[in-house]
Image (cartoon, rainbow, N blue to C red):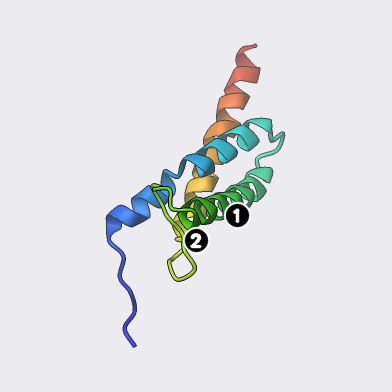
Amino acid sequence: MTVPVYVFNDWIWAAFDPVLIAIALVMGWKSDQFVKVILVSLMAFSVSVLVSWGVTAIGIPWPAPVSHDGPTFFPIRWIAGFLWGTLGFLAHLLYRLRA
């Protein structure tokens, strides 16, 4: 049995999933403690995988498709969700400091 190898381009597209970015930024903005960004990243990962799977299942092209036999790219999606959530949290922190 051979282990599938995915090109670097597939991993990058998983980090820039539009659903992942939107959820992580919005929920990171609404977080009142930095520790909550970890939960934000897990929620963003979960929802983005479900949406990607649903969109791919009905045949619509998606930047980071997920199928029953395809990868979810868990590490990169979770790390990207954490980074996008951190960006949202820091943006809101800066906004509150300036206001």
The numbered mark, 2 or 1, whose residue comes first in the sequence reads 1
Residue at image mark 2: 74
Judging from the image, what secondary structure is the residue with disc 1 in? helix
Q: Is residue 32 above or below residue 56?
A: above
> Where on the picture, by quarter, is residue 93?
top right
> Where on the picture, by quarter, is residue 29?
top right
Q: Residue at x 44, y 65 (%)?
A: 71
Residue 40 image point, x, y percent: 64, 45
Q: Is residue 72 above or below residue 86?
A: below
Q: Most extreme residue toward the top, as rendered? A: 99
* Nearer-the-camera pick, 17 or 53: 53
Residue 59 image point, x, y percent: 43, 53
Q: Residues within 10 Å of mark 2 (few under 14, many from 20)?
A: some
**Mark 2 touching mark 1, by CB under 8 A?**
no
Q: Residues within 10 Å of mark 1 (few under 14, many from 20)?
A: some
Judging from the image, what secondary structure is the residue with disc 2 in? helix
Q: Most extreme residue toward the bottom, as rendered? A: 1
Q: What amino acid is labelled 1 in the image?
A: Ser
Q: Is residue 83 above or below residue 29?
A: below
Residue at image mark 1: 46
* Nearer-the-camera pick, 90 or 47: 47
Q: What amino acid is labelled 2 in the image?
A: Phe
Residue 7 image point, x, y percent: 27, 61
* Nearer-the-camera pick, 84 or 32: 84
Foreground mark, 2 or 1, reads 1
Q: Residue at x 68, y 32 (%)?
A: 30
Which of the labelled discs sits on residue 80, or is there none?
Answer: none
* Nearer-the-camera pick, 70 or 84: 70
Residue 89 image point, x, y percent: 60, 33
